[in-house]
Structures are given as structure tokens and as C-alpha cells.
Amino acid sequence: MDRRERARQVGVYGFYILLFSLLQVSWPRGWVLFGARPDFMLVLCVLSGFLFGLDDGMFIGLLTGYLRDALAGRVFGAGMLLMMYAGILGAVLFRRRFRRQMFFALVLVSMVTVLYSAVIYGLDMLFPMIQDVSRQAESHLIRSAWTSAGSLALNILSGIPILLLLLHLGPYKKGRMDSSKTEMLTGDQVWRTI
């Protein structure tokens, strides 16, 4: 990769990370669904992994996770790891047969959103953020399920413009796919070895 391609990659990803993180923290309260907001950063790292491979998904996941932890004022680590794993899942799942098909990109976004919500719920039950509040697991589960449903719908809706932006104004020239180790791991280039 030459300097011009690297500069484009860094500039486009940097712009999208800043844009979507600002959009996420400034999302109007009146535009929530069941108490949930769209998770633009999660969708960005999943779709960048899906479209451009393991390296991009993992790196964007780490950056967005770091930014999420910094904006939330939390200890660094958990958010970074969860977002990195989301980017890795985006790179590994569905790559073999369904590359660049919008429907499967949105199915992937929905799968990772549900998994991410379940992990956050589990961590919240094990390590509550507010120690003095006593919770009943059943009411917390119902509230979390409604919030997860709203987040799922909003993430799918926000995935469409993010996918189109990455495809047409993305970090690589239009039509270029990354031929990284991910494709070899998932079998995309096996036919070339015969």
C-alpha cells in the first residue's frame, strides 16, 4: 500500500469515527426507540470488518472502543475489547459466500447487536455500575429486552447509510476489496491454490 492509499484510509476512517461518535453522543432524546439509540460505532466496526477484512475490523473496533470508553468516562479495556471482538466477528462471519451483499451485512449487524446487548446485560448483572440500587433480575431483563429491541431496529436502519458510505466513499477505491489473511482464513481464495 502506497502513501496515498494509506492517507486515504486514515483520513476516511478518522472522519467516520469522529462523525459517528459525535452523532452517537448528540443523538436527540426525542428520537429514541424503546429507550435505545442507534449504536453507530458498533455498526461502523462490524461493517468495516465485513467489507474490508480482519485488520480493518479489529483496528476500527479498538479505536471506537477506546473512544467509547473515553466519552463515557469509564476505565479503558472492556469497551475496547467488546468493540474489537465485534469488528472481528464482522470480518469472519459471512465472508465466505455472502461478501458485499447488503442483506447479509444487515443480518450481521443484527446478530452482533443482539450478542453485544446480551454481553452488556450479563456484565451489568454481574458487575452493576450503580452499587446501591437493588435490582430484580426479571424487571431488569424485561427493560433490557425492550431496549435491545429498539437498539436492534435502529442499528439495522443506521446500517444502510453506513454501508453505502463505506462502499462508495470508503477507505479504499470503489470496488476494491482487501485480500488479507481473513479471506484465506475463511476460504475465499481456496480456489486459487488448486
Image: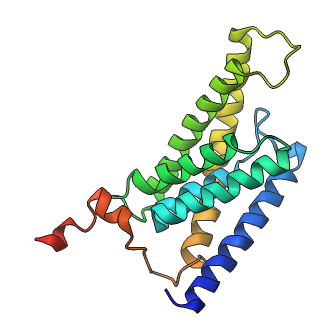
Note whether 125 is above or below 67 in the view shown. Answer: above
Which residue shows up at 76% across the image and 50% down it? Answer: 68
In the rendered image, residue 157, in percent from the top left (x then y), is placed at 64, 52
| Image-based side of 23 in relation to 102, left or right | right
In the rendered image, residue 91, in percent from the top left (x then y), is placed at 45, 57
Res 79 quadrant in image:
top right
Note whether 7 is above or below 189 in the view shown. Answer: below
Note whether 176 is above or below 104 in the view shown. Answer: below
Q: How many marks?
A: 0
| Image-based side of 111 in relation to 35, left or right | left
Which residue shows up at 74% across the image and 73% down it? Answer: 15
Which residue shows up at 61% across the image and 55% down it? Answer: 61
Which residue shows up at 54% across the image and 47% down it? Answer: 85
In the rendered image, residue 149, in percent from the top left (x then y), is placed at 65, 33
Nearest to the observer: residue 122 or residue 28:
122
| Image-based side of 169 in relation to 55, left or right | right
In the rendered image, residue 129, in percent from the top left (x then y), is placed at 81, 26
Q: In the rendered image, which quarter contains the C terminus? A: bottom left
Tell me which colouring the rendered structure shows: rainbow
| Image-based side of 127 in relation to 8, left or right | right
